[in-house]
Amino acid sequence: MTDIEDIEYVWSALGGDPALVPRISVTARKGALEARLPVRELARACVGACALAAAELGARRGGLREVPGVRVDDGAVATAFVSERHLLISGRAPVIFAPLSRFWRTADGWVRTHANYPHHRARLLAALGLSDDRVSVVESVLAERSAVEVEESVYAASGLAVALRTPEEWAGHPQGVALAGRPLVERGRLDATHARVLAPVDGDPLLPAAGLRVLDLTRVIAGPVATRTLALLGADVLRVDPPQLPELPDQHADTGFGKRSTRLDLRADRRAFEELLAAADVVVTGYRPGALDRFGLSPEALAERRPGVVVAQLSAWGASGPWRERRGFDSLVQVATGIATAEGTPERPGALPAQALDHGTGYLLAAGVLRALTEQSYEGGSRFVRLALARTAAWLMHGVGGSDAGDDVYEGADEWLAETGSALGRLRYALPPVSFAGGPVDWGRAPGVWGADPARWV
């Protein structure tokens, strides 16, 4: 497998012209995202395809004779895929996982829980009949129960727990079966709206998404990575969160670069939200399939109300199958799909060297939006793009090819880190890995305080 073949696969899944793939050059590095599974190759392909989609749209809007060359460096990619670990806030390292977010031994195997948010922690304890949140207490209770029984009881309490499965067990699971026939990137046209007229862009740097308004209804890494990338490329990105749901401040600091952030109750603040929708060019959602439909946010409803819109949807488990309405995160998808088994030992499950499903799917989602905008400029039509962490996991397990890492070595992240002042304090952060000739090398603004911006476009 060559450095480019996985990028060719992703570019094809995005509907891209195969003649553009030679515009990509790769710097492969030993030691980047080392794992048993081809994580480095997945990360490289997702970022490379995203950068090519950005360069393609930039060429279209800039009136360039050819698409700018794209550079993909495994060092930049590996650093960005663990951006949350490199983040420092006034010298303080962020908190990534809470004490109850971990693997637990059960009576017949293993289960992984996710309890970073207070409400998820409370639901986990309620499902286990506990008021004591000490790890030793939870450990003793789970040791007496079966993994699948814990999975189902915690889910019934709206918590998050997934039993460890082998790749073979997941392949036979109804959700694994439902995903098996789905494409990596689901994309399509919703209507026959006339071609979008994109205002020309020029200048240094070339910003392919300049002037576009992106309504960001996502949470927890994958979606925010996608919209952080669109912000890098010049989009006006406004993240909207419901006031009743908490956010992890460190997570926002990592993924909030280039964006603004506000809080709105979609019921009580309906008029303000409708005004945002009426002027949005792109709507990105990261909630469970169907969860936002009652607010008129299905792709079909949005296309009817805002012809020419691009709707990008992200979920953990996919839009079909018995688990479609379940909550999920990267760590849990790894456990369900067999990745934790493949990366572990007979004694204990393992994990990928990064939350690669989140980051990889985030760059794929951004690429899908960019390609939809390019296609619109020629063919018109409201568009949708849909991805799922579990589908990306299946590609990692069964589709991504390994490659020679080359002679260069990933010797550390320092080359791809920067510092800036912000309302949150002095930030050290990972630079964006999306790179093309003439394009941006950093975000135009640091993250602000979560939810503190007005609910309006600039």
Image (cartoon, helix red, strand yellow):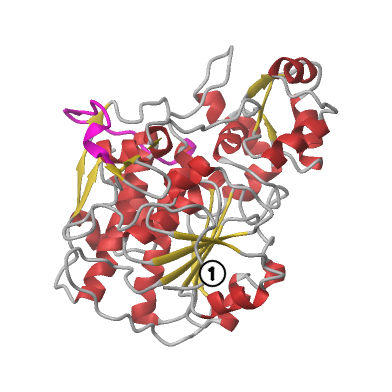
Q: Residue at x 42, y 31 (%)?
A: 92
Q: Position of residue 162 (x, y in %)?
A: 68, 33
Q: Which residues are magenta?
A: 397-418
**Against 153, is 351 above or below?**
above
The amino acid type found where label 1 is placed reads: Ala
Queried whether the magenta region covers residue 417, the answer comes back as yes
Q: In the rendered image, which residue does mark 1 sit on?
A: 455
Q: Residue at x 22, y 70 (%)?
A: 59
Quadrant assignment, res 83:
top left
Depth order, front residue of 438/339: 438
Residue at the limit of the structure toward the right, as seen here: 129
Instruction: Mark yes or no: residue 6 visible.
Output: no
Helix, strand or loop at label 1? It is: loop
Left or right, 55 with reference to 97: left
Instruction: Residue 342: say if magenta.
Output: no
Q: Residues within 10 Å of mark 1 (few under 14, many from 20)?
A: many
